[in-house]
Image (cartoon, grey):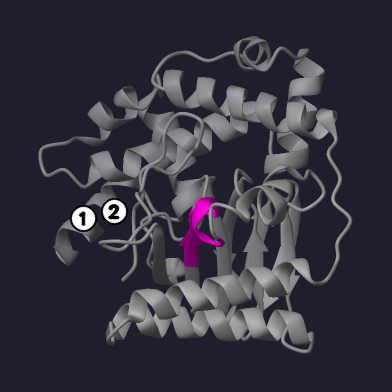
């Protein structure tokens, strides 16, 4: 199963409830270019995420870093970290995405000792999982097993999932990473989420750089540095890109016109919307609308 268009709140927190019928865990086989945006947009969630690339290769961005992940490699992405993924050179990248509630990886009694410190650490936004490392290979193998268990649902599969999760977590902590807790990193993350929250709340309205900076309690120059460092673009370019992202769903509605959609998502000129949409999507909004209707 793949979620081709997941919902996020104003802070980019994903709203999907990641669980099976009885367990706080979910496993998806995701083909990146099948997402409505053509990539997996920036988001975060409370769940830990484990990734195993089964075809092609992808560029994952986690907080400020870009990582190239090839077939048979994977990632651990910590709770609360902003992340996105793009296919590398149209490789048809598909990956298994395992999302699990931190409270479920070990028993309640062991959680304070073995999970909570990882959750709060600021020096582990992610870990690379490379097969040549024994501990990482064990984790990748368990991800594959859990994916199969959820698909096939054999007798007692929930217990087998739990066993594999415990194995994953044990292999993650036996490498002995020294955990760090930097208040400044926590504040940076919070301020970035506050600014994104403001943009996503007010994108249909006129937005100035001063407004975004104020939401993060930053100067305009510092606000620009945050966006450049984490999102690799200016704050106002991000606003434009986000408006285009929001327009995609509206354009799929049969009764919508390009002009109506342009104004609904915050553009004050149809021609400017068309120009920016073409730069982002390599086609006009009308061509996109016709393409989507032909696929229905």
Establish if 134 lies above or below 169: below
Residue positioned most to the left:
255
Label 1 secondary element: helix
Q: Position of residue 125 (x, y in %)?
A: 72, 52
Q: Residue at x 38, y 55 (%)?
A: 18
Q: Quadrant of residue 225?
A: top right
**Badge 1 density bin: few <14, some 14–19, many ≥20, Cα 10 Å:** some
Establish if 186 lies above or below 45: above
Establish if 37 lies above or below 93: above
State whether residue 93 appears in this view.
Answer: no
Work out how far the residue at label 2 is from the one at label 1, CA to CA, in angstroms: 5 Å
State whether residue 181 appears in this view.
Answer: yes
Q: Are marks 2 and 1 in contact (CB under 8 Å)?
A: yes
- Residue 287 image label: 2
Residue 101 counted in the magenta span: yes
Q: Residue at x 28, y 87 (%)?
A: 154
Establish if 207 lies above or below 48: above
Q: Quadrant of residue 33?
A: bottom left
Depth check, front residue: 218 or 183: 183
Q: Position of residue 138 (x, y in %)?
A: 66, 84
Q: Position of residue 276 (x, y in %)?
A: 48, 39
119 left or right of 175 in image: left
57 left or right of 206 in image: right
Label 2 secondary element: helix
Depth check, front residue: 61 or 292: 61
Residue positioned most to the front:
109
Q: Position of residue 30 (x, y in %)?
A: 43, 70
Q: Which residue is mark 1?
A: 290
- Residue 110 image label: none
In the rendered structure, which segment of residues is drawn in magenta? 98-106
């Amino acid at each position: 199963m793949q979620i081709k268009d997941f919902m996020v709140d104003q802070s980019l927190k994903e709203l999907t409830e990641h669980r099976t019928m009885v367990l706080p865990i979910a496993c998806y086989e995701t083909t990146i270019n099948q997402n409505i945006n053509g990539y997996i947009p920036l988001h975060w969630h409370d769940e830990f995420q484990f990734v195993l690339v089964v075809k092609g290769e992808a560029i994952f961005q986690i907080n400020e870093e870009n990582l190239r992940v090839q077939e048979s490699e994977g990632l651990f992405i910590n709770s609360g970290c902003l992340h996105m993924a793009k296919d590398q050179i149209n490789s048809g990248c598909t990956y298994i995405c395992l999302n699990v509630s931190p409270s479920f990886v070990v028993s309640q009694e062991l959680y304070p000792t073995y999970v909570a410190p990882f959750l709060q650490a600021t020096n582990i936004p992610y870990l690379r999982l490379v097969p040549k490392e024994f501990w990482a290979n064990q984790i990748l193998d368990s991800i594959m097993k859990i994916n199969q268990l959820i698909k096939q649902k054999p007798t007692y599969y929930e217990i087998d999932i739990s066993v594999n999760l415990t194995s994953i977590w044990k292999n993650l902590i036996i490498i002995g990473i020294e955990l760090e807790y930097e208040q400044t990193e926590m504040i940076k993350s919070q301020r970035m989420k506050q600014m994104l929250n403001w943009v996503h709340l007010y994108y249909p309205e006129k937005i100035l750089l001063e407004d975004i900076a104020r939401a993060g309690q930053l100067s305009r120059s510092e606000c620009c540095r945050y966006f450049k460092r984490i999102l690799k673009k200016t704050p106002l370019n991000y606003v434009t890109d986000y408006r285009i992202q929001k327009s995609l769903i509206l354009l799929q509605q049969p009764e919508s016109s390009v002009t109506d959609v342009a104004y609904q998502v915050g553009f004050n000129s149809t021609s400017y919307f068309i120009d920016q949409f073409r730069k982002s999507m390599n086609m006009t909004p009308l061509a996109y609308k016709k393409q989507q209707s032909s696929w229905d």
